Image (cartoon, rainbow, N blue to C red):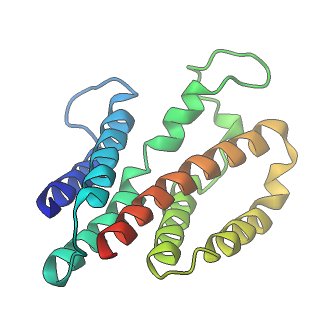
Amino acid sequence: MIVLVIVALAAATAAALPPVARVAWWLPSVTATGALAVAGVASVARSTPVTGVPAAVSIVLCGLAAVFGGLTLAPSVFRLAPTVSGTDRDDDRPDTVLRGGLVIGALERTAVVVTILAGWPEGIAVVLAVKGLARYPELRRAQSSEYFIIGTFASVLWAAAAGGIGLALLR
């Protein structure tokens, strides 16, 4: 069962990497989400805690899946969410992009998965508070605040799922 978890976590991580061929915009997110779901089911289906090298590999892969697997999730959610002005969802919307979002999202997912794996889920509140305070000046526009909330929720939920898989493996 642990082999299935490791393979599924690796697939969730790899699904977010840039594709070598042109694929549908939704495919990486759906693949990563499916792989994370398989890892989650397999992690709770086993009967004993994982220890030793398999535990270390699983925890590292949980972290990688949280950080890299979530890369495609927020942009996919943005494409699905209708805009305030009702404009076409396929435009690039360069005026609404929050600068540094890719890096901040990766750091946010790293912090969330680490707090969960460390047994300190309260740390998620600290992460969100710091992010909110840092982004506050940029959130005055309606679409910026909308993107901030949607992106943050998608990112945190993804990282929490990956961290939960790690906790399930260790218990």
Q: Position of residue 52 (x, y in %)?
A: 16, 84
30 or 44: nearer the viewer: 44
Query: Quadrant where the C terminus lies?
Result: bottom left
* Residue at the front extreme, as displayed: 47
Q: Residue at x 62, y 70 (%)?
A: 124
Query: In the figure, residue 122 lies in which quadrant?
Result: bottom right
For this view, does 26 lie left or right of residue 97?
A: left
In this rendering, position of residue 58 left or right of residue 69: left
Question: Can residue 16 be seen by looking at this rendering?
Answer: no
Which sits in the foreground, 2 or 123? Answer: 2
Q: Is residue 148 left or right of residue 44?
A: right
Where is residue 111 shown, x and y percent of the image?
53, 72
Q: Is residue 19 above or below residue 24?
A: below
Quarter of the view holding residue 48: bottom left
117 over 12 or under it: above or below: below
User: In this rendering, is residue 137 above or below 25?
Assistant: below
Q: Residue at x 84, y 58 (%)?
A: 137
The residue at the point 48 percent across, 59 percent down is 159
